[in-house]
Image (tube, rainbow, N blue to C red):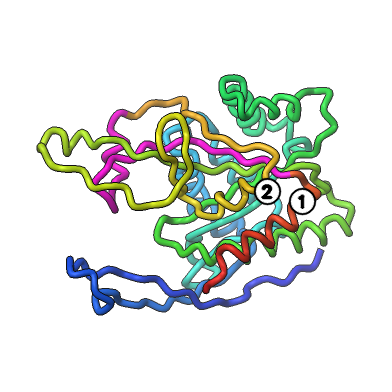
């Protein structure tokens, strides 16, 4: 299955020089060339494992991430990595899709589906997942896994989704098993919590400034801004608590703010027939103004 890859793109990152005045002169502009590549079995194992560990957060230890990376790399003509220093460098971002039905006998997929089922049983908003994963279901679910380092610009996301659409189209022409009835996107969100360090030092906490959605536990914020658009086109979406508990995690993740950060798992289910229009909406939302 032939495929085009490696388009180059320019993106601009903004860096605050840490001056408190807030004027335009305080922002330095850094131009970075990003390149999109096919997953490389000989190069990307450790980089993808690092990104998966970030995606699953404290629950990463519940899964055989090495086996999951091997599965991703077993389909190198599907999915993308984003790099800044050529094909032999480590990926800063990736996106791929796995056929949960096709790989249902693999232990890491069994573990993942069991994990998601356990979350759906305790969160009413996710209850429909149990029907999709039942033995009697004819659904072909594509699990989308995507993650990027926190300082990567969101503008790299639309090309990865557009390439995925193109790659799935080519795969279907070759009669490969990617005719998905549903796409399940695994992501993560966070809520702000009072910092224990601030409480100990009697320091005032900074007010929230980011935009998010409301939940029972307070305002929810997105690690991936595209999730806001994906949810608008979704059949269902919802957050869930991680299985593992890490009491120190809220303060360890607060690099850019005074409040503590409590991450949560997040899933979004999209009808396969609406996936293309959803990808277009993501592109419009994240396109540079």
Point 83% across, 48% down: residue: 179
Instruction: Name above or below for residue 29 compared with residue 158.
Output: below
Q: Could you tell me which secondary element the residue under label 2 belongs to?
A: loop
Mark 1: few, some, or many residues within 10 Å (few <14, many ≥20)? some
Q: Are marks 1 and 2 in contact (CB under 8 Å)?
A: yes
Say left or right for 265 vs 95. Answer: left
Mark 1 to mark 2 CA distance (whole Å): 8 Å
User: Foreground residue, 201 or 166?
Assistant: 201
Point 53% across, 72% down: residue: 288
Number of dots carrying numbers:
2
Q: Give residue 113's position: percent from left, percent from top.
A: 65, 29
Q: Could you tell me which secondary element the residue under label 1 belongs to?
A: helix
Task: Find residue 145 and name its label.
Answer: none
Task: Find residue 274 and name its label.
Answer: 1
Instruction: Name above or below for residue 28 compared with residue 218.
Output: below
Residue with the mark numbered 2: 233
User: Foreground residue, 17 or 246?
Assistant: 17
Instruction: Name above or below for residue 228 compared with residue 108.
Output: below
Query: Quick check: is 266 in the magenta stretch?
Result: yes
Q: Give residue 131's position: percent from left, percent from top.
A: 75, 25
Point 23% across, 69% down: residue: 22
Point 41% across, 55% down: residue: 150
Say left or right for 232 vs 56. Answer: right
Q: Give residue 188's position: percent from left, percent from top.
A: 49, 42
Please tell me which of labels 1 and 2 falls first in the chain: 2
Query: Quick check: is 34 in the magenta stretch?
Result: no
**What residue span does the magenta drawing correspond to?**
247-270
User: Foreground residue, 154 or 232?
Assistant: 232
């Amino acid at each position: 299955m032939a495929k085009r890859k490696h388009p180059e793109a320019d993106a601009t990152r903004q860096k605050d020089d840490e001056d408190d005045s807030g004027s335009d002169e305080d922002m330095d502009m850094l131009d970075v060339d990003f390149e999109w590549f096919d997953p490389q079995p000989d190069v990307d194992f450790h980089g993808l494992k690092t990104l998966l560990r970030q995606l699953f957060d404290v629950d990463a230890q519940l899964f055989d991430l090495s086996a999951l990376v091997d599965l991703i790399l077993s389909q190198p003509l599907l999915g993308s990595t984003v790099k800044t220093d050529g094909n032999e460098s480590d990926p800063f971002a990736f996106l791929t899709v796995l056929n949960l039905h096709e790989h249902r006998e693999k232990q890491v997929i069994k573990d993942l589906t069991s994990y998601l089922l356990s979350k759906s049983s305790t969160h009413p908003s996710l209850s429909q997942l149990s029907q999709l994963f039942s033995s009697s279901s004819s659904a072909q679910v594509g699990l989308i896994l995507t993650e990027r380092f926190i300082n990567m610009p969101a503008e790299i996301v639309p090309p990865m989704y557009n390439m995925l659409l193109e790659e799935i189209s080519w795969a279907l022409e070759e009669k490969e098993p990617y005719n998905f009835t549903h796409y399940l996107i695994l992501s993560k969100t966070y809520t702000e919590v009072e910092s224990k360090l601030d409480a100990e030092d009697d320091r005032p906490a900074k007010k929230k400034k980011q935009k998010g959605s409301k939940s029972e536990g307070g305002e929810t914020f997105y690690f991936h801004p595209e999730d806001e658009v994906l949810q608008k086109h979704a059949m269902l979406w919802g957050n869930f608590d991680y299985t593992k508990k890490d009491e120190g995690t809220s303060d360890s993740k607060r690099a850019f703010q005074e409040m503590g950060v409590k991450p949560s798992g997040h899933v979004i289910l999209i009808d396969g027939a609406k996936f293309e229009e959803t990808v277009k909406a993501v592109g419009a939302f994240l396109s540079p103004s």
